[in-house]
Amino acid sequence: MTLKRQFRMRDAFTIAFVFISPIVALYAVFGLVMQAAGPAGWWAFAVVLVLQLLIALSLGVLVSRWPFQGGSYQWARRLVGESYGWAAGWAYIWTIIIVIASNAYAIASFIPPLLGIPDFSLIEHIAVALVILVATTALNLIGPVVLKILTRLSLAAEVVGSIVLATVLLIWHREQPLSILFTSGGAADGDYLWGGFILAMGFVGFGFAGFETVCSMAEEIDRPEKNLPKAIVGALATIGIVVLYSSLALVLSTPDFGAVITGAIVDPAANNITESLGPGIAQPFFGLVIIGFAASMLTAQTSISRVIWSFSRDGVLPASRFMAKLSQKHRTPNRAIIVVGVLAIVITLLAFSEQVYATLVAAAAGGFFVTMGLVVVALFARIVSKKWHAGPFSLGVFTLPVVAAAAAWIVFEVINLAWPRSPGEEVPWYVSWSVPIGLAGIALVGLVVWLSVRDRIRAVNRDLHEHHQIAGEEDTNSAESVATS
């Protein structure tokens, strides 16, 4: 049984758009950015957008050449080798599963203000997040129609929650002059560059990550070698413009940056909206935020289940035969969807300590850039060695400088996210070192699993190598070459 191409260009764009979501990208990090860098932190959104577009262009080049189910797993294994590809895919799987768990937790935090009830206790919060995970998994099992409906509903929510709301704040509730964008407001205690702006770039980088997840569904998308590069670049550019506009409105409508920077106002975005428009407007706004997070969560589960299915099709995961089966009706990997839901539940159950939960989320941020780094750096090496042949989407003479700049940005961001800003001072040591610890944990578990399937990985490598020799070419764009199991 083969996959069904049931998504068009507009669906690919919408999925990429909704996974990041301007609401999620902005409201998840706005308070952190302002506390780190003050009003001038707004420039971090602009700088990081340009740098992330370099990554999007680089990944567009890759998916155009190899439009296969599994995204980074398939690209990395063809760029370097099976074990390298396995490691890239393994890191990506756990990155997205942690993101799914964090989204469920975030949705649960918005329910009390939406309903006007007291905040949940930690146990209640975890329980509600688990219910959300079960519900999302059930929706995903219904079929692609649910994904299409919810993503389009999320687009409408984005228009109201981002563009319309920002316009209202700019026109009728502006509190600050434009010149405030060039001041820190006392943030970072004088260490503005390293402790302020560069730290803010780390937060924004996480907010703008995930646009590439739709590439994991390449074999379900019409003409993916042409449509996916346009979808991921276009979605990221559109989201970036919306976030720049919305964040500008939030900065200029903030009456007291001192309270934001000191932490007296924990969520400046929600506070601005409540103070400017009243609680009657704020409650429906939280409903829009929930829709944005829910759609992002659904698309994340959909895409990462395809990566697991791609692994399973090659037989390089435990229980591969079980997870490689497609549903009869929609030809979707429902068993892989269930596995993702179960693993996200396990991650959520680990969140009974707020510090542990923060550690997991930080690890996800690092995981995004490590995974992208594995493929972009390998692409850079392939181009430099003159062994790269472009697909239908190509940057021509700009390919090398764009990929080189993207690789440099990724390496910088991994160091930025992993570097402990305050070891042993205000937070426990394991929180300061959360990214290295989280990535080390993923790598350790991955090593154990890899050892259990390495013979199969080697067999797949031989099969793929023999296929290329028979074809008389270094690699192939044929989807059949992926299915070696």
Image (spheres, rainbow, N blue to C red):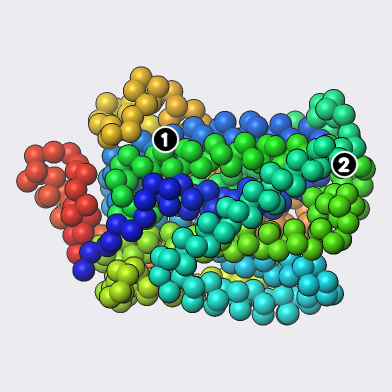
Which residue does the image show at 67% across and 66% down from the upper left? Answer: 107
Residue 180: x %, y % from top left: 85, 29
Determine which residue is flagged by label 2: 173
Circle 2: residue type: His
Q: Residue 81, how many percent across, how many down? A: 28, 47
The residue most toward the left is 470
- C-alpha distance separating marks 1 and 2: 40 Å
- Name the disc covering residue 58, or none: 1
Which quadrant of the rendered structure holds the N terminus?
bottom left
Q: Locate residue 228 relative to residue 291 in the image: left or right.
A: left
**Are circles 1 and 2 on residues that touch, CB within 8 Å?**
no
Residue type for callout 1: Ser
Residue 44 or 284: which is nearer the viewer? Answer: 284
Residue 134: x %, y % from top left: 54, 77
Among numbered discs 1 and 2, the one appearing first in the sequence: 1
Q: Which mark is residue 328?
A: none
